[in-house]
Image: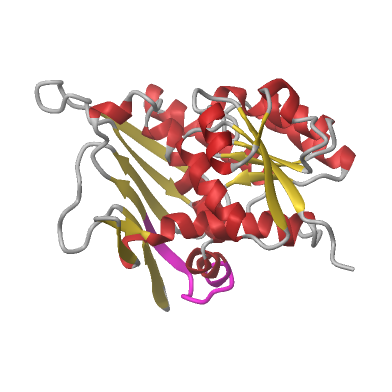
């Protein structure tokens, strides 16, 4: 007899929730049942045919088996904790938290109840990046010599106010990927800059991080909201890794499609699709660990703290 579908509830009905809804609809053995939280929650629930609940009740609702925590960073721990205590599996968006104690609490609760608590470290589930995570540590390109990670674009004034900054909202992507590829670094140096308002109304904040690893590997992480890259080889989202016996490369612009009058980066939605399938069918139903675990999220939290210190203190 086929198992009942895993019933998914969403808390946090913002922009990224639409990507998760599309992913749930494509995912076998999964059904979206309820939503809560955010100014758009009523309209969102009505449009997707979901039961509208309050943020205080959805985590313990009998309508859901698993909760997607898609709220702002400051409430991730609150809703993840409530869901785990109620016996629900959780996928919590990145960054999970920048408080080590909060993540430790999630680890403990999930372990005590044998529940999945999976970080929304979405890029690692794209087949191309999963291949990188297997190839590099296994010596597929020899000894990694140098790695470059970039995410660069101009963040317009009507959007920048919704975010805390590239080092808070975006850098975690590069950190969990570098952790999957190379493990923990020995040293890190970091810099942040912005521009006068007369040059860029938003200030165009950007962050650069250099990390050194045992054995000689160096990595360079760049996140910039200052400029669009319209050159023939755009750094919009790029990873290039050179080894002593080869190299490997990924760009989010490698797969583009014309949709409703605009060019769409198809890899962006695909990573949500692959992540949802892994969460439900490999982790909840199959008993496997996530490719990027909640313990990895804790390591990213620690590393981020040291990078912020390097950035602010010059250490």
Magenta segment includes 216: no
Left or right: 289 in relation to 190: right
How many numbered tags mark residues here? 0
Q: Residue at x 39, y 61 (%)?
A: 266
Residue 279: image location, x then y, percent: 68, 54
Asked which colour scheme the image uses, the reply is secondary structure
Left or right: 278 in relation to 264: right
Task: Give the residues in magenta.
Answer: 134-148
Residue 14: image location, x then y, percent: 49, 33
Left or right: 47 in relation to 27: left
Q: Residue at x 77, y 60 (%)?
A: 288
Inspect this view and state whether residue 308 appears.
Answer: yes
Residue 294: image location, x then y, percent: 68, 43
Inspect this view and state whether residue 185 appears.
Answer: no
Residue 254 drawn above or below residue 21: below
Please tell me which residue lies in front, 95 or 87. 87
């Amino acid at each position: 007899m086929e198992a009942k579908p895993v019933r998914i509830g969403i808390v946090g009905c913002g922009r990224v929730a639409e990507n998760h809804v599309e992913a749930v609809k494509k995912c076998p053995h999964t059904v979206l049942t309820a939503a809560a939280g955010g100014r758009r929650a009523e309209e969102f629930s009505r449009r997707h045919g979901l039961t509208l609940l309050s943020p205080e009740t959805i985590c313990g609702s009998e309508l859901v088996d698993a909760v997607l925590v898609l709220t702002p960073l400051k409430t991730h721990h609150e809703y993840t904790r409530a869901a785990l205590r109620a016996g629900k599996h959780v996928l919590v968006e990145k960054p999970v938290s920048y408080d080590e104690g909060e993540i430790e609490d999630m680890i403990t609760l999930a372990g005590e109840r044998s529940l999945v608590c999976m970080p929304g470290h979405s890029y690692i589930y794209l087949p191309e990046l999963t291949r990188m995570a297997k190839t590099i540590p296994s010596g597929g390109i020899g000894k990694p010599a140098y790695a470059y990670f970039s995410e660069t674009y101009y963040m317009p004034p009507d959007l920048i106010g919704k975010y805390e900054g590239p080092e808070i909202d975006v850098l975690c992507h590069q950190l969990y990927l570098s952790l999957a590829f190379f493990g923990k670094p020995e040293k890190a140096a970091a810099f942040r800059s912005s521009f006068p308002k007369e040059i860029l109304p938003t200030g165009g904040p950007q962050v650069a991080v250099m990390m050194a690893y045992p054995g000689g590997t160096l990595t360079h992480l760049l996140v910039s909201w200052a400029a669009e890259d319209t050159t023939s080889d755009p750094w919009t989202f790029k990873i290039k890794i050179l080894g002593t016996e080869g190299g490997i490369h990924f760009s989010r612009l490698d797969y583009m499609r014309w949709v409703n009058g605009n060019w769409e980066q198809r890899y962006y939605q695909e990573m949500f699709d692959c992540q949802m399938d892994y969460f439900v069918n490999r982790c909840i139903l199959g008993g496997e660990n996530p490719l990027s675990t909640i313990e990895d999220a804790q390591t990213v939290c620690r590393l981020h703290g040291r990078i912020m210190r390097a950035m602010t203190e010059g250490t």
